[in-house]
Image (cartoon, rainbow, N blue to C red):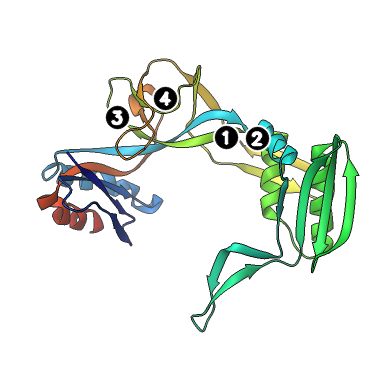
Amino acid sequence: MKTAAAFIGLAFTSFASQAKADRYLVIAHFPPHLAGSIDKALEEVKKEAQWASWFGDAGLAVKKQRDEINKALEEWGIGRDEEGPLSVVVNERGERQKTTHPFAYRIYRKDGKIVVEIRLRGKVIFNYTTDNVEDAFWTLLEKGRELNDTLPEIQIRLIEYRFDMPLTYSAFAIPFCNGTYYGPDVKPLRVVIDKRVEVNFFVENRTIKPLRLPEAITIINVTRIGEAWLGGRHVIDACALPKVDKRGVIALVSRDKLNKVVKILER
């Protein structure tokens, strides 16, 4: 049986559908201010769907950020060009143009040292070498300030490195209540329920005061069935988790009921 997918953002609907699919996996993400409407919408969808449920978000903590950042530094490094080749914006005249930055930078490891390099119009205007990864990030942030760029992406990298935060794969938390798990074969399985990060960040004295950081918990009461659920999605039983906030509705819908279900969810 062919299954296609319909993704609904309530304000926007797109279909990644296969021709003549027998059924559709419909996923409706509700914005936070409409979370209270999920249960009502689910009850209506259940009347039309082959199967339907609410879902939440979970992060499968498969790696640590510090290891990944060190790996990136060993390879090409971490950086950006003055012109972002993959970033395009539309100006007021409706013209597409590439995103530009005031300068290019790169942090990388060479001969056991960490190198910080800033380029302007292809010319190196700043070069700094250190033994310490955090020192490299702080130095780049300080220099960025002088060049009128706060470099928020480097702030994020520094927070990830300093607190060795978990690198997570996104997963749907669905209340199957039978221990269902589709995802990477990692042991022990660790899951992040709340991925929010809140810190006070002070470049001037190189200080980060954490207010809220993601915390991974070990999950033991699930059984891995495979790598991915319908359409390549990671899924974990919400009943195996201590707390899950409802984020939307997910349903399997026959082709003849698809439009009706979409209209229910868009209301």
Q: Is 186 located above or below residue 147 in the figure?
A: above
Instruction: Identify the mark at residue 242; answer none if there is no mark.
Output: 4
Asked whether the residues under the numbered discs 2 and 1 touch, taking CB atoms below 8 Å apart as contact, a structural biologist would say: yes
**Mark pair 2, 1: CA separation:** 8 Å
Task: Locate residue 90, reporting x and y percent.
Answer: 52, 74
Is label 4 in a helix, a strand or a loop? Answer: loop
Q: Is 201 located above or below residue 94 in the figure?
A: above
**Mark pair 3, 1: CA separation:** 24 Å
Q: Quadrant of the C terminus?
A: bottom left
Residue drawn at x 80%, y 50% is 203
22 and 148: which is toward the camera: 22
**Mark pair 2, 3: CA separation:** 32 Å
Task: Look at mark 2 in the image and give the residue it sits on.
Answer: 68
The three-letter code of the residue at mark 1 reads Leu
Q: Residue furthest bottom?
A: 93
Task: Look at mark 1 in the image and give the residue it sits on.
Answer: 167
> Badge 4: few (under 14), some or many (20 or more) residues near its Cα, within 10 Å?
few
Task: Locate residue 75, reporting x and y percent.
Answer: 71, 40
